[in-house]
Image: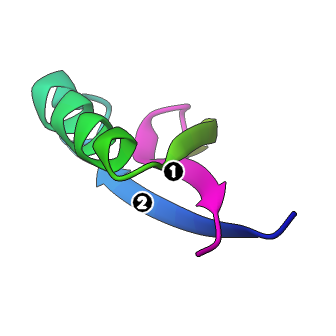
């Protein structure tokens, strides 16, 4: 079976270097990808000094056409 992958990056915004994620925007992006056959494989955050999140990376896969 052959897979194709897609990675999206969501900015975490807030005071100084980040920390807050727009959940509605994230949900909308993930729902749009799900309708197109993409399945979430994993999600992780990239941290800055002090532990604040800079970005959320979400990796999706689907069967290659």
| Residue 48 visible in the displayed image | no
Residue at (55, 31) in percent of width and height: 51
Residue at (45, 49) in percent of width and height: 37
Query: Badge 2: few (under 14), some or many (20 or more) residues near its Cα, within 10 Å?
Result: some
Quarter of the image where one finds residue 19: top left
Task: Tell me: 1 left or right of 54.
Answer: right
Judging depth in this view, the residue of 45 and 33 nearest the camera is 33
Judging depth in this view, the residue of 39 and 24 nearest the camera is 39
Q: Residue furthest bottom?
A: 65
Quarter of the image where one finds residue 21: top left
Q: Which residues lie in the magenta part?
A: 47-65
In magenta stretch: residue 54: yes
- Classify mark 2: helix, strand or loop: strand
Quarter of the image where one finds residue 61: bottom right
Residue receiving disc 1: 57
- Classify mark 1: helix, strand or loop: strand
Most frequent secondary structure within the magenta stretch:
strand
Q: Residue furthest right?
A: 1
On the image, the x and y values in percent for residue 2 come to 81, 70
Quadrant showing the C terminus: bottom right
**Mark with earlier residue (2, 1):** 2
| Residue 40 visible in the displayed image | yes
Judging depth in this view, the residue of 57 and 62 nearest the camera is 62
Are the residues flagged by discs 2 and 1 in contact, CB closer than 8 Å?
yes
Q: Which mark is residue 8?
A: 2
Residue at (44, 38) in percent of width and height: 53
Say if 6 sits above or below 44 in the image.
Answer: below
User: CA separation, marks 2 and 1?
Assistant: 6 Å
Task: Tell me: 23 left or right of 47.
Answer: left
Quadrant showing the N terminus: bottom right
Task: Tell me: 62 left or right of 9.
Answer: right
């Amino acid at each position: 079976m052959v897979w194709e992958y897609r990675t999206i990056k969501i900015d975490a915004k807030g005071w100084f270097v980040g920390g807050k994620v727009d959940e509605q925007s994230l949900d909308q992006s993930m729902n749009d990808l799900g309708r197109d056959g993409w399945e979430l494989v994993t999600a992780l955050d990239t941290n800055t000094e002090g532990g604040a999140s800079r970005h959320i990376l979400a990796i999706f896969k689907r069967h290659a056409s």
